Image (spheres, rainbow, N blue to C red):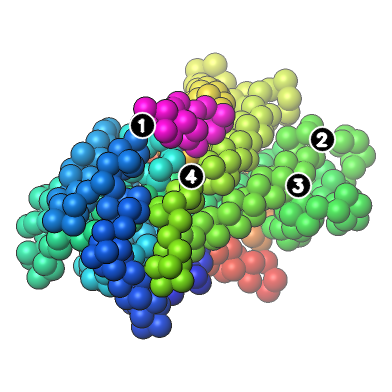
Amino acid sequence: MVELTGNTLTIEDVKKVILNGIYVTVSPDSLRIVQKSRAAVDKIVDEKKVVYGITTGFGKFSDVFIDAGDVEKLQLNLIHSHACGVGEAFPEKVSRAMLLLRANALLKGYSGVRPVVIERLLDLLNAQIHPVIPQQGSLGASGDLAPLSHLALVLMGEGEVFYKGERQEAILALSKEGIAPITLKAKEGLALINGTQAMTAMGVINYIEAEQLALESEAIAAITLEGLQGIIDAFDEDVHKARGYQQQVDVARRIREYLQDSKLVTKQGELRVQDAYSLRCIPQVHGASWQALDYVREKLEIEMNAATDNPLIFDGGEKVISGGNFHGQPIALAMDFMKIAIAELSNISERRIERLVNPQLSDLPPFLSPEPGLQSGAMIMQYAAASLVSENKTLAHPASVDSIPSSANQEDHVSMGTIGSRHAYQIIQNVRRVLAIELICALQAAEYRGVEKMSTFTKALYEEVRSIVPSITEDRIFSKDIEKVNNWLYEVNWEKLQKEFMLKSQM
């Protein structure tokens, strides 16, 4: 069970809830703070004070006063008019993460919602009712208005959801689970949609997948080193400590551990004095990507526990300030950084693939073909990798450098952070397929050198993947192999597998 407080949610907690379906509760102490904040909103309405979003319109309409009798209608109109999302729906796991993150943010007690709003968000989460939320339509400032409006619709019994593998009307799923729709009161609609939870939820899912990919990329690179009889000296601890980046030191250590009893790697001078950069500089390049991921993780965990709506209520309602915490710039920059860092894993991977298949760069069979000339072998797999890498270069262009004014120029600088997070997700899917291609080619090269000479760790990995895709003994439809390995890289519990294989290597 995970208990939300509004301040303590971690990425490890998100993994438990999103990937493992762990039940979520709320801290009673946090709910009491929420109740006090709500009382302040009710007082503002009763006293007819002019406060943005509570007794006024939104955006450019912030100067329009709303009568107390219309505040509920104001919230309903807000959600209906802002539900303008278009395109394909976010993956269910992202929608699920949005529910979790929005509930956590509202629990901080700065938003002025009733406890029932938070409870309904968690009712949906625990019942695994996931709002259908279109991916496109957010500028990433004023919050993720369009995506979060589609989430808010479901609380009111409107819109669509994914429920038990089916896409259906929200009211049907709510009825099946005995969950009553709610009518949004003053400020509650605004509190639900004025936040960065779409880009942050997508960002957290990106991080979880990218972290696993980064670890897998190192093990795959280790097999490539064996296939190319790479020089292990370049991974010596002294080399990497001399530079001082801990992430670089860690990558080199893991590579040494994976290859500790390999008879396929060489010492400098045995076959050649030094390797190409795509082999020799694995710790430097992969380590730099880890540095970026560490930065991204830090920003995500801050944002996951941040109050990002507007206005915010302090001191029991004595201080209500209209600010700009909904602006997604911190996450926008983090997502753009992640895009570049993860794309680099495929850039260097594709160069290793080229060294595996190009007969001018190694003594392996041309294109790893069982019958060069008659059979093309891995020739076009390298094409596919090159295509994905090229696509990533376009996707990696920073979304955050763009801004288009909105709301009659009231909102004149926006982050485009949601676009950045969506592009990061696309890059991650491309990178996984490039790594799948490298793994297929690396296994074939290691097989050519002699499986019995592989390290205990890489041999165990070889046997695991060979149960999914067989050796290349003749040309076949390699697209199927790539997808099988891609799916395995996505689904495997890498930390568990890594521990099992390392135990084998230490026996």
Q: Quadrant of the C terminus?
A: bottom right
Q: Is residue 308 magenta?
A: no
Q: Position of residue 355 (x, y in %)?
A: 68, 29
Between marks 4 and 3 in the image, the one whose residue lies nearer the viewer: 4
- Residue drawn at point x = 19 percent, y = 52 percent: 67
Q: Nearer the viewer, residue 129 or 370?
A: 129
Instruction: Give how far apart the Cα atoms at labels 2 and 3 are.
Output: 13 Å
Query: Which residue range is magenta in the image?
Result: 398-416
Residue 247 quadrant: bottom right
Between marks 2 and 4 in the image, the one whose residue lies nearer the viewer: 4
Crowd rating for badge 4 (residues with CA inside 10 Å; few <14, some 14–19, many 20+): many
Which is more N-terminal, label 1 or label 4?
Answer: 4
Count numbered badges in the picture.
4
Which is more N-terminal, label 3 or label 4?
Answer: 3
| Dot label at residue 327 | 4
Residue denoted by label 3: 283
